[in-house]
Image (tube, rainbow, N blue to C red):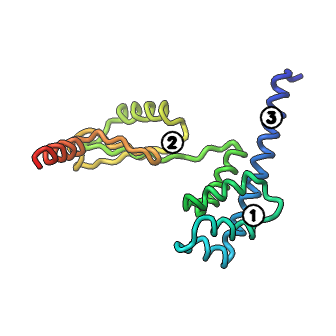
Amino acid sequence: MSSKQERVNRYAQAVWAAMLERWQGALTDAAAAASGDKVAALLNDTGKSAAEKIEALTKQLPKDLPAEVRNLLGVMVEAGDLSLLGDVSAALGNVISGKTSVVKAEIASAVELSDEEKEQIRRQLIAQHGDNLSFSFAVDAALLGGLRVRVGDSLIDTSVASRLTALRESLTSVVR
């Protein structure tokens, strides 16, 4: 028999999954409404204000759409990110299923790294970013030395070439 805490956790997970599924369904409905010809044209019209775009979209949305989803759509319209709606819905699907999306980790070095060095870099990046990384290693002689590591949207550039560029910019700004 399961403990009280295990049962509580199961119920909480069920509520969480139901809420996410409702949101995902609502976002799918909203994406369908936003893809209508008139609404899509209005949303892409740079001459219209965000308030006008939100009002037009709101008229096309299902009446039973949760207020939170309406608010999210408003924020996305204001930020110009409504095109990400399908991706947000897919990400919610991953959360519901417990999947995590794979993040690409690209490592460029001036010389070929040994297997031991690659493994050390893998361990460090997994410790920092989690174990949902997909690694690719490349050699770029233009770096002159050091590494350029890109994980998702973040870039860590410890290459000699970037340091020389920074030094050159620093010196030229002082000379002017």
Residue situated in front as seen by the camera: 67 or 136: 67
Name the N-terminal-most of marks 3 and 2.
3
Mark 3 is on which residue type? Answer: Ala
- 119, above or below 34, in the image: above
Q: Quadrant of residue 37?
A: bottom right
> Disc number at residue 133?
2
Within 10 Å of disc 3 (Cα), the crowding (few <14, some 14-19, many 20+) is: few
x then y, percent, for residue 36: 69, 75
Label 3 and label 2: CA atoms lie apart by 29 Å
- 66, above or below 8, in the image: below
Q: Please state the total of marks drawn on the protein image.
A: 3
Label 1 and label 3: CA atoms lie apart by 26 Å
Q: Quadrant of residue 146?
A: top left
Between marks 2 and 1 in the image, the one whose residue lies nearer the viewer = 1
Name the N-terminal-most of marks 1 and 3.
3
Mark 1 is on which residue type? Answer: Asp
Give the residue furthest to the left.
175
Is residue 106 found left or right of 69 in the rendered image?
Answer: left
- 37, above or below 156, in the image: below
Q: Residue at x 68, y 45 (%)?
A: 95
Is residue 101 found left or right of 120 in the rendered image?
Answer: right
From the image, tell me which residue sits under label 3.
12
